[in-house]
Amino acid sequence: MPRLPLVAALLAALVPCARAQLEFPSRSPRKPPLDSLVRQRAPDFAPTPVAPRATPEFAPEPGAPRKQATRALERDREQVRILPDEHGLWARGANYKLRFEPGRATFVPFLASHSPRNFPIDFSVRRVSVAGQPLHLVPDAKPQATDLRVELDHGAFTERWDLAPRSVEHSFVFAELQHRGKLELELDVTTELAARETVDGFEFSNEFGHALYGRAVALDASGARLALDTELRDGVLRLTVPAGFVSRATLPLVIDPVLASFGIEATPTDTLSPDVTYDTTGTAILYCWEEIFSASDHDVWADAYDPAGNPLYRGEWIDATATYWGRPRSASNGATNRFLIVAHTINTTTGRVEVWGRTRSVTSTLISAQFKILGNAGYDVLYPDVGGDPYPTGPSYFLVAYERIYAPGVDQDVNARLVTANATLQGGVIGVDQSVNTYDIEISVSKSNSSDAWNLAWQRASPAGGNDILGARVAWDGVVVAPTFPVAVGPLDTTATSSARTSARPRSTATARTSRSPTPSSIRPRRPTTTST
């Protein structure tokens, strides 16, 4: 039986419960994640060594107004970021993304946050000839990044992408020419956007905005310059350099168009779902939030500030790919001075919702690779929350709790997983509450376990009507020390739970180690767990 579209499945899971085995009351639906375009997998991550605190990059001069420091951070978000993954590279500008894979590049213009999805433009070299002789092209040229430049070495020439915050210079560099004569370069251009020729070049547009591929020019090493004839027909862009210019050119010869996007929205991207975390030493505060690039592509950004509200270090994209990352949450680990940011995302191969994460250092701009925390082909797992650990030495972990959809609209469970500060998983799935035919949502984990145990709280549909609030406690090592207990159960409808715990550091190492001793299983038996998530 074909699987329902992902959006429909998620809506079915998150809208008011179906009256199936129990009579559940109605409740407000929550925003589900939508389809993504590119599957992301996490490469290995070398742990970040604990280092002394560095001087913040954006620390203001003594007496400088806070507004000036904030403007510096706003400018930082306008900078280009190049993010490698195992398949190639991603580049994120202020109003575009670029995906580099072997032999091709895909430009994704920002058009509008309310755009239903991304509308990428794919570029790949089709054919190059000089004096009628085709040049040999290296298949699947691997992208290589240096500073703000990405190059693909095609053998006979180099394709170059120079990245600026709001535009891209796309050029072709011929360092050698075996023949002299008319040079023709053809690119395959694939996009759903409507293409038309304008005075400035070629415009790719829809009702949400457009991208402009500018008129190309030819330049040589002596400074000679010539505007080129450019033609776009049937998805093939043809750039032609006249034989006379090629014959006289001092090498290297460069063909140089410019690519830029122009969204119909005059305002910046929509931002939502903020979260904030104090680090355990009290010197840094992490703010993270979600940005809507399009309805199918949400990104996550994180900034660090000091307690006075001044920017620290450099902000960074936790995700800037075409994959949907939704509702980020963060926590801090005291032993390694690292934050963990988690979010739910979508696996386009299985169609399932998963939980992914990324760590970043409190003391510097070092950041891990993206890594999968939870998810398989059996169930959707979504709306994660994460708790940290202020304990000053290891072992210590993050606790990531999440909703597992066992039966959409009827049965959802509360599960959790321990994650190390080195972006690896510890132990198996923790079944916090896997009771049958209970609908558990709105999971909240205390930001800290106070070196002992995390508090969890969640909302459950009451068989009598309305909603109740339940809780549990999970020890620092993953043992459920207090199984499900009532927090607010009764005739009143109680919703939108939140859990908190102080993050004070232990008075002494000896006291802390005593409190960290695992609870004997004979006294506090661990709840059964399952390998399926």
Image (tube, grey):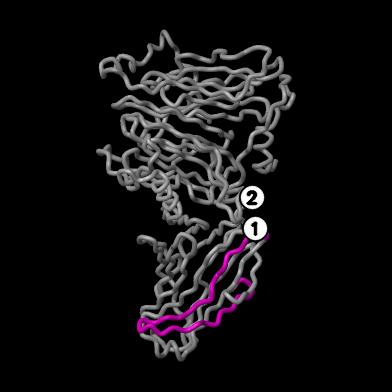
Which circle marks residue 345 in the picture?
none
Measure how far apart labels 2 and 1 are at the Cα level. Answer: 8 Å
Question: 44 and 499: which one is in front?
Answer: 499
Res 405 → quadrant: top right
Question: 70 and 429: which one is in front?
Answer: 70
For mark 1, give the secondary structure: loop
In the figure, 175 relative to 440: above or below?
below
Question: 45 and 376: which one is in front?
Answer: 45
Residue depicted at x 39% and y 63%: 149
- On the image, the x and y values in percent for residue 9 come to 67, 38
Q: Does label 2 or label 1 sit earlier along the sequence?
A: 2
Residue bearing the label numbered 2: 114
In the figure, 474 relative to 294: above or below?
above
- On the image, the x and y values in percent for residue 241 come to 49, 84
The reply to whether callout 2 and callout 1 are in contact (CB within 8 Å) is yes
Question: 496 and 296: which one is in front?
Answer: 496
The reply, left or right, for residue 181 in relation to residue 496 is: left
Query: Which amino acid lies under the numbered mark 2 shown in the image of this protein?
Result: His
Residue bearing the label numbered 1: 208
User: Is 493 part of what is drawn in magenta?
Assistant: no
For mark 2, give the secondary structure: loop
In the figure, 411 relative to 482: above or below?
below
In the figure, 3 relative to 156: above or below?
above
Residue depicted at x 38% and y 28%: 397
Res 485 → quadrant: top right
Res 49 → quadrant: top left
The magenta region covers 207-235
Residue depicted at x 55% and y 26%: 443
- On the image, the x and y values in percent for residue 403 come to 56, 29
Q: Number of marks in the image?
A: 2
Query: Which amino acid lies under the numbered mark 1 shown in the image of this protein?
Result: Phe
